[in-house]
Image (cartoon, grey):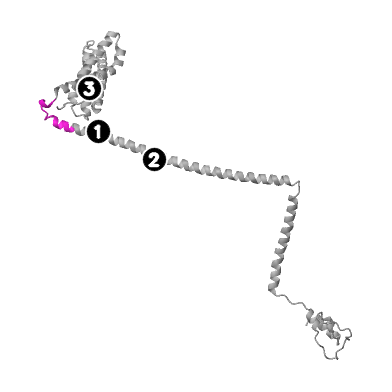
Amino acid sequence: MHPPLLSLRQSFPFSPKISASTNPHSRRQPNSTPSFPVAGSIPSPPPLLSLRRPRCSAGDGEGREEQQPSRAKDVLSGMVGERVEELLRREENRALLDGLEEASRRVDRARQALADIEKQEAEALRAKEYVRQLESRELEIAESQRDLLEARTMVEEAERSLSSDIDENNSGDVLPEEIDQNVERLESLKAASISSVAGMLAGLPIYLYQATSFSQLLLHLATVFISCALFGVTFRYAIRRDLDNIQLKTGAPAAFGFVRGLAALDAGKPLELNNDSFIAYSIDGAVYVLEDIFIFLSAAIALDFCFKMRLLSPFPIRK
């Protein structure tokens, strides 16, 4: 029992009986009179007990506390939505709304353009990577072709060297009856022609500088032509099939150059028995020898090139 009710009963020892009319579910009795109980008997008042509120459980309180914020949010969102709709229905905000829609469309188009640009950049990067791979493979192919060409050249050199060695080993066993004389004469004529042309072209600048007249130039060129023709025939028979012998290929033009240079020195002015004449004579002899060595060496290079290119056949040639 609540403390206020207990204090009330203690102050009033008797209390009237509440008629049935106080009950909302009972019918009203018009002639009902209040009855007072006897002192000392204190009945409990059911109507007062029925007026007490039932206590709420802890779960109900928590549920109400959770429902209150959600209801407040719903009410607030409804008010905001109504306010936004009201603002959008106004005519002065229609232009702003159209501009906002146009701006959103521009943003969408810009995003689409950006996506296209990124896609094109990705494709360009892939294309660059593909081109780089093609270039690297092209370089590898070029290097492989260069290596293959070098290997092929080395194989050809080895074949020529082997064939020349075999022919050299067998050349001593070649009988005169086995040599085709007509072909040998033709090859010797070709060697003389090639050597003479190469020697004349090599000596032409020298004799153009030294000659004082046209007849002297013709005389120098004629002597070079005949000397180089003889050198070509001799060089073919001296080298034979030993085409890789560098000492033999350089020794022959050096010998011809010394002989021709010393002959030109002998045909010049006589030597006097003094130092100045001896020095001048030595310088002239060295110049003549170097000029002739240069001419015959050029002819030897031309003949060696023709031998290696199979334009000219070395000695001997079998039938």
The kind of residue on which mark 1 rests is Glu
Residue identified by numbered label 2: 137
Q: Nearer the viewer, mark 3 or mark 2?
A: 2
Residue appearing at x 14%, y 29% in the figure: 171
The kind of residue on which mark 3 rests is Pro
Q: Is residue 58 magenta?
A: no
- In percent of width and height, residue 117 lies at 55, 42
For the residue pair 317 and 280, the one nearer the viewer reads as 317
Q: Secondary structure at mark 3?
A: helix
Residue identified by numbered label 1: 157
Compute the Cα span from label 1 to label 2.
30 Å
Residue appearing at x 75%, y 52% in the figure: 86
Q: Is residue 319 above or below residue 22?
A: above
Residue extent of the magenta highlight? 165-179
- Number of residues whose C-alpha sits closer than 10 Å to that of mark 2, classed few (under 14), some (14–19) or many (20 or more): few
Q: Is residue 177 magenta?
A: yes
- Number of residues whose C-alpha sits closer than 10 Å to that of mark 3, classed few (under 14), some (14–19) or many (20 or more): many
Report whether 250 appears left or right of 53.
left
- In percent of width and height, residue 172 lies at 12, 29
- In percent of width and height, residue 315 lies at 17, 26
